[in-house]
Image (cartoon, rainbow, N blue to C red):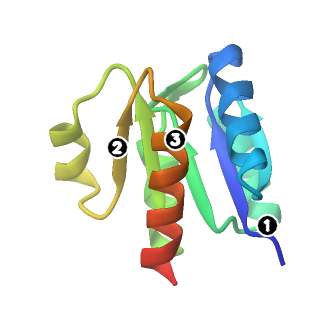
Amino acid sequence: MTQSILVAEDEMIVAFDLRDTVEEAGYRVEGPHAGISTAMFAFQKERPDLAILDVQLNDGMVFEFADKLAEQGVPIIFHSGLHTREEIANRFPGARTLEKPCPPADVIEAVNDALGAAA
């Protein structure tokens, strides 16, 4: 079965680019979601194998949602232009961080690494 990746990103050009990049690598994408509420609803319907999250979505900061994902053992990749790797690492030590803009090859490498580490 194809692994699913939840994408939460409120900048639509970036969101669709992430979706296309991940789909082209052979993964199934849930989203993109511009807000925490729709991402949370999708998560409640089906637990993803991985989540790629922008830190700031159109309805707030994503950390509370990320806590719920982490509690369920879902690997997280934060994709942000605002927050430093150190800030995120302090709160989510097991998460990966990609700074925007991020080349597609780096996104796929992070996804493959995170899913490999979770296996």
Is tag 3's residue or tag 2's residue first in the polypeptide sequence? 2
Report the residue at 63% width, 37% height from top. Answer: 8
Residue 89 on image: x %, y %:
21, 50
Type of the residue with mark 1: Glu
What secondary structure is found at the residue carrying circle 3? helix
Q: Residue under circle 3?
A: 105
Outermost residue toward the front in this view: 105
Type of the residue with mark 2: Thr
Q: In the rendering, which numbered label is found on residue 97?
A: 2
Say whether residue 39 is left or right of residue 96: right
Which one is in front, 88 or 106? 106
Q: In the rendering, which numbered label is found on residue 46?
A: 1
Q: In the rendering, which numbered label is found on residue 85?
A: none
Instruction: Check the picture and name the quadrant holding the N terminus.
Output: bottom right
Outermost residue toward the bottom in this view: 119
Residue 39 on image: x %, y %:
70, 44
| Label 3, label 2: how far apart the Cα atoms are | 14 Å
Say whether residue 52 is left or right of residue 23: left
Labels 3 and 2 touching (C-beta < 8 A): no
> In the rendered image, is residue 34 in sight?
no
